[in-house]
Image (cartoon, helix red, strand yellow):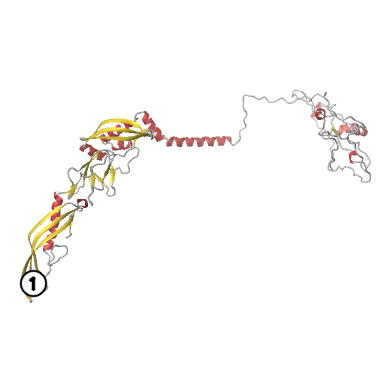
């Protein structure tokens, strides 16, 4: 049961020492003896440190305090009375320095046998009167230098291990080398990937430094026009910021035919002012054959080199093509699915490779620059002589077949005769004869690969009719006017009567 401190706050009461053992059975709990251990520090034998000392072992589990009797009231202790308890003489350095002991002093087995019982009981006597504990200012602190012997053993402290103050000792974890190696490997992989990804850009930068690519805005325009004039289409495309999507006409063979028709000569190239968006205009003057062109290019410095941001030029081929007939530009066939194609500045000859319809002279387009479209209206399709003869021959064939018909109203033919109802016609006797005729051709539909043939003639019908069941000869002249559309997209013309 805890005992409340009746003293003044901050004043710690002294605890009376336990009286010697062997008291009455009904003694108070505080009068019962407590085992103590006496340390024989005055006569410590240094050689005994190597041997084993035997100490009395006390069985704390079996020890029980005396019973408290309820018949006799416990004596009250006046904690404030002078002499109520006496302070024991300090026996350890802790008691000497801070005035209290953490553990009671022990007694060895040898000392217990040599000391009488009454002397053991007097180890911690309770004096009748004692003065309150006061700090002694004259006490000297226990030496703390490592060079002086310890109070407990009397031996010197072991010498300290030499430590170099210039070296920082770091304890490395066992997994640190593996982690470090993994980090270095990962760093090398990332650096390799970076080098590979930037190899192209580095190559372009080195090319700029070594002069292998143009180093200014006007230089790239000059190199571009020079490559076109030499017929080097691949080199010219390399100076463009974006390669065209349909490079059908951007080939060396097409450029060579362009140069044959109109060589390109560079007159002047002058760099202009730069704009706020990082581009620079370049004014250029050059000749395509006898045609002089003045234009400007938009350039920019990207990916380590100067490039041209404009398209080469463009030809709208949708309005040039004759339906069903292949279109060739400078000998290169143009697919039917495209409507326009990029083209370098130059001259481009149009052809169909058809014997019936071709382009009239002049049949060439001039692509001046990217900002000036070629004049498409100057190029026209025309019916060739072979096509004219083929169209007339096709109509003549149809007319001949119609003349041989034994019908008054044959399908696909120009004749359409109504017989007399009272004079039936003997069909086997029908004979058509051409008295006069003429055919003319209009080529207003050449974009559709057809021509119109107008047929004008005078025919005569000779036939036998029955009058009151008697055959009778009838001669009937009539005029014929017919229009035939003749398609020339195939290998053979195909006439179709339209009226």
In the picture, measured across the screen, residue 136 lies left or right of residue 306, that is right
Secondary-structure class at tag 1 = strand
Q: Quadrant of residue 118?
A: top right
Residue 107 in view of the camera: no
Viewer-proximal residue among 427 and 368: 368
Tag 1 residue:
465
Question: 407 left or right of 89?
Answer: left
Say if 426 sits above or below 25 in the image.
Answer: below
- State which quarter of the image contains the C terminus: bottom left
Q: Nearer the viewer, residue 478 or 426?
A: 478
Residue 409 image offset from top left, x and y in percent:
14, 66
Where is residue 197 shown, x and y percent of the image? Answer: 43, 37
| Depth check, front residue: 392 or 180 | 392
Residue 114, image x and y in percent? 90, 31
Q: Nearer the viewer, residue 416 or 21?
A: 416
Label 1 Cα neighbours within 10 Å, binned few <14 / some 14-19 / many ≥20:
many
Q: In the picture, which quadrant includes the N terminus? A: top right
Spot occupied by residue 498 in the image (x, y as percentages of width and height): 18, 59
Q: Quadrant of residue 36?
A: top right
- The answer to whether residue 365 is left or right of residue 220 is left
Where on the picture, by quarter, is residue 453?
Answer: bottom left
């Amino acid at each position: 049961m805890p005992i409340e401190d009746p003293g003044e706050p901050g004043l710690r009461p002294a605890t009376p020492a336990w009286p010697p053992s062997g008291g009455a059975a009904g003694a108070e709990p505080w009068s019962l003896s407590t085992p103590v251990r006496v340390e024989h520090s005055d006569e410590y034998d240094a050689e005994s440190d190597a041997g084993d000392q035997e100490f009395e072992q006390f069985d704390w589990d079996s020890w029980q305090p005396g019973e408290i009797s309820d018949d006799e009231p416990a004596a009250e202790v006046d904690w404030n009375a002078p002499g109520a308890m006496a302070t024991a003489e300090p026996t350890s350095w802790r008691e000497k320095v801070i005035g209290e002991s953490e553990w009671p002093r022990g007694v060895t087995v040898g000392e217990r046998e040599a000391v009488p019982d009454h002397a053991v009981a007097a180890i911690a006597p309770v004096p009748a009167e004692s003065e309150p504990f006061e700090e002694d200012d004259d006490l000297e602190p226990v030496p703390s230098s490592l060079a002086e012997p310890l109070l407990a053993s009397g031996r010197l402290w072991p010498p300290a291990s030499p430590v170099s103050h210039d070296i920082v000792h770091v304890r490395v974890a066992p997994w640190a080398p593996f982690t470090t190696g993994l980090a270095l490997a990962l760093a090398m992989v990332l650096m390799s990937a970076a080098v590979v990804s930037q190899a192209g850009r580095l190559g372009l930068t080195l090319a700029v430094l070594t002069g292998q690519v143009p180093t200014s805005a006007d230089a790239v325009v000059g190199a571009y026009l020079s490559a076109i004039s030499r017929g080097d289409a691949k080199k010219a495309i390399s100076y463009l910021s974006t390669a065209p999507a349909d490079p059908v006409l951007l080939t060396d063979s097409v450029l060579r035919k362009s140069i044959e028709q109109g060589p390109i000569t560079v007159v002047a190239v002058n760099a202009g002012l730069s704009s706020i968006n990082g581009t620079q205009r370049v004014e250029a003057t050059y000749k395509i054959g006898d045609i002089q062109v003045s234009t400007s290019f938009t350039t920019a410095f990207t990916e380590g080199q100067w490039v041209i941001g404009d398209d080469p030029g463009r030809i709208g081929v949708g309005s040039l093509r004759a339906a069903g007939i292949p279109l060739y530009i400078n000998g290169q066939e143009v697919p039917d699915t495209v409507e326009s194609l990029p083209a370098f500045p130059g001259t481009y000859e149009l052809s169909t490779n058809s014997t019936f319809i071709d382009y009239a002279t002049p049949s060439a387009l001039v692509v001046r620059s990217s900002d000036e479209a070629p004049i498409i209206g100057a190029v026209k399709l025309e019916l060739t002589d072979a096509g004219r003869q083929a169209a007339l021959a096709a109509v003549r064939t149809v007319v001949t077949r119609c003349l041989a018909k034994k019908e008054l109203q044959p399908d696909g033919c120009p004749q359409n005769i109504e017989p007399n109802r009272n004079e039936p016609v003997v069909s086997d006797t029908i004979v058509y004869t051409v008295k006069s005729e003429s055919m003319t051709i209009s080529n207003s539909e050449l974009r559709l690969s057809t021509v119109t043939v107008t047929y004008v003639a005078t025919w005569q019908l000779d036939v036998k009719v029955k009058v009151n069941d008697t055959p009778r000869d009838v001669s009937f002249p009539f005029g014929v006017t017919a229009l035939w559309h003749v398609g020339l997209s195939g290998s053979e013309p195909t006439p179709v009567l339209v009226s």
